[in-house]
Amino acid sequence: MSLVDHAANVRRNAHAPYSNFQVGAALTSVEGNLHVGCNVENVAYPEGTCAEAGAIAAMIASGDKRIAEIAVIADSPAPVPPCGGCRQKLAEFADGDVRVTLATTDGARLQTTVAELLPGAFDAGYMERT
Ligand code: THU
């Protein structure tokens, strides 16, 4: 099964009663494991947590450290761009050349990379003098 297929499967578990917009994400870690996440909203913070953040949290909780590849899927007219916060999280746990596949449930695919999603990313190198 492809990474997009795994993302589509976990998307069915999304808890999105406020936006009614279900998102699934699946990643393989450099350590060789699959981790999945869906968006989880709540009444106080209706934007909730994103699918990408869920997959990253699952990866870190499992003990894996780095993303090798990630796919995200939603039922949108065009492949959904990850939000700003998720771009920073991707940059934290993936090298710039890591492939990101953005997908729609009706078959559209957009291939990009972590560096393309967050050009000029702030990273620890900028804190070298502290
Ligand atoms: N969402 C994601 O999970 N990932 C994205 O890349 C875009 C947005 C979620 C957050 C919220 O639950 C809903 O989609 C609407 O913003």
Image (tube, helix red, strand yellow):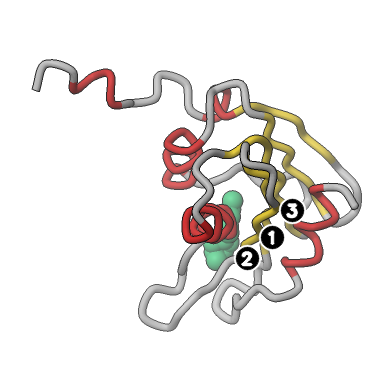
| Dot 3 amino acid type | Ile
Tell me, yes or no, whether the two marked residues, 1 and 2, touch with CB atoms within 8 Å: yes
- The local secondary structure at tag 1 comes to strand
Ligand 1 neighbours mark 2 (CB distance < 8 Å): yes
Relative to 104, say whether 99 is above or below.
above
Residue 50, image x and y in percent?
A: 53, 60
Q: Where's residue 49, x and y in %? A: 48, 64
Question: Percent position (x, y) of residue 54?
Answer: 54, 61
Residue that label 2 marks:
38
Residue 12 versus residue 123 in the image, above or below: below
Q: Earlier in the sequence, mark 1 or mark 2?
A: 1
**What amino acid type should be assigned to the residue bearing mark 1?**
Gly
Q: Name the residue at 48% across, 28% down.
A: 118
Q: Going from the N terminus, do you reach mark 2 or mark 3 first? A: 2
Q: Nearer the viewer, residue 12 or 83?
A: 12
Q: Which mark is residue 73?
A: 3
Which mark is in front, 2 or 3?
2
Assign a secondary structure to mark 3. strand
**Residue shown at the point (57%, 53%) measured from the top left:** 52
In the rendered image, the vertical position of residue 78 relative to residue 105, given as above or below: above
Q: Residues within 10 Å of mark 3 (few under 14, many from 20)?
A: many
Residue wearing tag 1: 24
Label 1 and label 2: CA atoms lie apart by 5 Å
In what quadrant does ligand 1 lie? bottom right
N-terminal label among 3 and 1: 1
Q: Amino acid at mark 2?
A: Cys
Contact check, label 3 and label 1, Cβ < 8 Å: yes
Query: Badge 2: few (under 14), some or many (20 or more) residues near its Cα, within 10 Å?
Result: many
> Is residue 108 shown above or below 61?
above
Residue located at (70% from left, 49% from top): 72
